[in-house]
Amino acid sequence: MITYILRSLLRNKTRSILTIGAVALTTFIFCFVRAIDSGMDRLLSSSGAEKKLIVYHKNRFCYATSKLLERYVPRIAEIPGVERVLPLKVYVSNCRASLDIVTFEGGPTDELLASRPIKVVAGDLEQWKRDEDAALVGVALAKRRSLSPGVKFRVGNVLVNVVAIFESGSSVDDNIAFTHLGYLQRIPGLNSVGYVTQIEVYLKDPARSEAIARQIDDMFATDESPTDTKPERAFLARKTRDLAEVVTFARVLGYVCVLVMLAILANTVVMAVQDRVRELAMLQAVGYDVQRVAAIVLAESGLAAFAGGLVGAGIAALVLWWTRLGIATEGIQVEFALSFGSIGMGVVSSTVAGAIAGIAPAWHASHLEIADALRSL
Amino acid sequence: MALIELRGVTKVYSKGGRDFAPLKDLDLDIEKNEFVALMGPSGSGKTTLLNIISGIDKPTRGSVRVGGVDVPSLSRSKAAQWRSRAIGYIFQRYNLVPVLTAFENVELPLLLHKMSGAARAKRVTLALQAAGISHRANHTPTELSGGEEQRVSIARAIVADPQIIVADEPTGDLDRDSASAVLGLLTRLHREFGKTLLMVTHDAKAAEIAQRTIRLQKGTFLTPEPGASSGNGTRPPTPSPAPTAAGAAP
């Protein structure tokens, strides 16, 4: 029977190819949306949970406007329960959502290395510690901008000398270039000597995160730069809120794609059934019962959708693996992450949509008036 | 008891708000191993009668028993299952699946039965041989002539070894030579393999090969003309069938 089903699928090659292509395209979009969704989930779940607090300028939502006095750092470090403090000057090429954002983070070198578990894969780490204008570039950013040790790299007013490439296992850090704090503070036009963008606070006991955050904010409530302190996950969630809304919209689009696929498939299967009404009646005349005829039509529909799903999910996986696409907002990189689960979900969704699309034509095919259908041209 | 037994069979269709009765109160007995030709002008109800006997259509009134089975009482699926065992259907327009080879077309009814691939292949080969078309087993219908296609259709009808073969104008689309070959094959199925044949035809010459000819007009049987060698109710002696199928035919 499988021979009959496969050959039936291939009898109108153009129609089959177009149908499989349409399913592949919708599955591709579906997988793409899933990848953005997974990337967001991964970003938020990989963050340091409640063990790390981010101190930011109150009521400021962009790196360019958050200015905290550097003198806050020793005061925060003195709070009981704080293990270590990392002041960071952040410079981003674009505050808005973009597919290609370059983020510089300048911090005291030793504290920075102690706080970020990185592994240098090319270049010289000691040179980075030594040279003021040296940059330690994340592997994803290096790949995207074709950077390697020895290359000079300019974004806006920031000109750095790439001396080493690192990988961290974190999609956020892999898209960052680390520099010296003082160097970034002195960039012409920034006017930020004595100021930092944010302060990372590492805690001894995550259970005290809420109390310490409140203590920090109370400490500077009436100071020049009132603070807003949040656990890292909440901070990232706020930073990526706009993106999350886009992702929600994209998710709806993904489901609409599945519906479009359903309509396309249903139309194709209806046409395929109408084209061979007499043949389906013949099958029933020689003894094929309602269930078998319905199963043939459903199998054809499901198989076409499965093939399209496989092609679409495969292309999506290849494209995302090859391009390592990601989107950044306010300097936070969300890497599209297509898991095997998402690929499977894409293929299964398209197959199920195919089977659902085949239900009405299958019912029609299996309940033909055999005598009338045999007389049809 | 006759193999096929119809009593008071009436079929009424509604068309454009008007009732139309292609069959009116028909009684008919067809014995086992009988070869009956069903003749009549277009619209006389021949195909409707064939479809009712084979369970494809249901009568509006009356009873239809085939091999002791009350056919109209069967559900659609049960009727299909019964047909797969009891009836071989030969169509005027062959109705072969264009994307399958002759072998695969003949194999279709056997896919409904539990049997090994080897046993299936053996039966298909025997059916193709019996229909004299085994040399074209790997060709698709588009590569076959009309006569060859009808032979494949006949092989498909006999492959499951049904007791009854119904043929709806099997020579209607064929040239004279092909028609003659197909009629010869049907005669052989009846004489050598002991099949009960019910054949609808417009062609008086084709009807001559049958033992009995039933004439339908406006949904009723015509009485036989005096001295006619065949007609309703005349039943020539049934030839004793050759031992069936097991080895000689599928």
Image (cartoon, coloured by chain):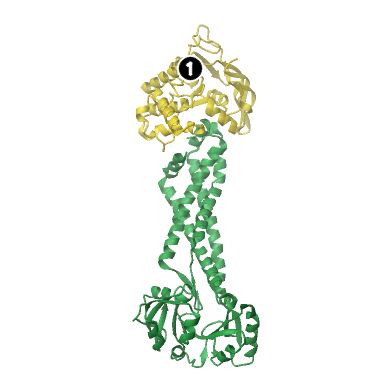
Which amino acid does the dot numbered 1 rest on? Gly
Bin the neighbour count of mark 1 within 10 Å (Cα to Cα): few under 14, some 14-19, many 20 and up. many
Is residue A357 in sight in this rendering? yes
Find residue B126 and report its horizontal and vertical position in percent. 41, 25
Find residue B106 and report its horizontal and vertical position in percent. 44, 30
Vertical placement of residue A145 versus B74, above or below:
below
**Chain drawn green, letter?**
A
Vertical placement of residue B137 versus B209, above or below:
below
Q: Which residue is mark 1?
A: B194
Find residue A141 and report its horizontal and vertical position in percent. 42, 75
Residue at left offset 49%, top offset 13%: B211
Residue at left offset 54%, top offset 48%: A355
What chain is tagged by disc 1?
Answer: B
Vertical placement of residue A192 versus A371, above or below:
below
Looking at the rendering, which quadrant does residue A160 occupy?
bottom left
**Chain drawn yellow, letter?**
B
Find residue A93 and report its horizontal and vertical position in percent. 45, 81
Q: Secondary structure at mark 1?
A: loop
Q: Is residue A50 left or right of residue B176?
A: right
Which residue is more in the foreground, A194 or B47? A194
Which residue is more in the foreground, A35 or A148? A148
Q: How many marks?
A: 1
Judged from this view, the residue extending furthest toward the top is: B227
Is residue B47 in sight in this rendering? no
Q: Is residue A118 left or right of residue A215?
A: left
